[in-house]
Amino acid sequence: MILNAVVDGQWRHARTPAEVSALLDQLVFGADPRRPSDLLLTEAPFDDFSDEQPAQVCRVAANPDAGFGALLWYLNDADSGFSVSYNPNPPLDDPWLASDPDTARYHDRFTAIPLDQTRAALQEFVAGGGTRPSNIQWVAGDFYGRITQVLAPTSSVHAA
């Protein structure tokens, strides 16, 4: 399988384990937080003109300066829902992780997870052939990185 991702507006393709590792590092630790990237696994290199549509997509936004990233995962099917990464103890300061640069929308602060968890989840996405990573928490969300799932309070302070 080939890992395909957009970096600075250009499609990149990683085939070998070393290329995959380098691309994942760039997407997480060298990212522009204003430009999320879709990750796709395909048999042939993928770009905007490809006929093959991957079954799953994982979108990553990372802010190396803030130390956080956020993930959006979905099946490439009109009837499927979206899952967003979830952090029950989010950063106090919003790391401003863009979910869609065309609409200036940003991930919910509760979707921000530490960069090492972001990188590990992307590695699992690749190793699992595009399945949703199980090494982080997920909740229902929308295409713009907002949480849509009703969440129960996690402490008695919020339950009052």
Image: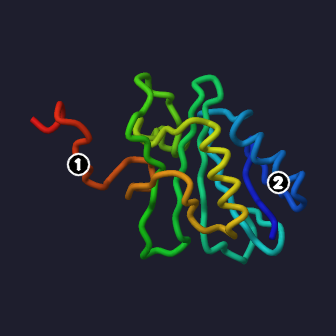
Q: Residue at x 59, y 42 (%)?
A: 61
Please tell me whether mark 2 sits on a helix, a strand or a loop: helix
The relative height of residue 146 versus residue 41 in the rendered view (above or below) is above
Residue 100 x %, y %: 52, 45
Q: Quadrant of the N terminus?
A: bottom right
Taking depth in this image into account, of 56 and 45 the one nearest to the observer is 56
Q: CA distance from mark 2 to mark 1?
A: 38 Å
Q: Amino acid at mark 2?
A: Val
Q: Tell me: residue 11, above or below residue 22.
A: below
The tag earlier along the polypeptide, 2 or 1, is 2
Q: Position of residue 120 (x, y in %)?
A: 66, 48
Quarter occupied by the C terminus: top left
The image's colour scheme reads: rainbow
Outermost residue, front side: 156
Mark 1: which amino acid? Answer: Ala
Which of the two residues, 136 or 77, is positioned nearer the viewer here?
Answer: 136
Mark 2 touches mark 1? (CB < 8 Å): no
Pointer 1: what residue?
152
Residue 20 — which label?
Answer: 2
Asked if residue 64 lies left or right of residue 139, the reply is right
Residue appearing at x 42%, y 33% in the figure:
90
Label tally: 2
Q: Position of residue 24 (x, y in %)?
A: 75, 47
Classify 10 Å Cα crowding around label 2: few (below 14), some (14-19), many (20 and above). some
Packing grade of label 1 (10 A; few <14, some 14-19, many >=20) is few
- 48 vs 19, left or right, is left
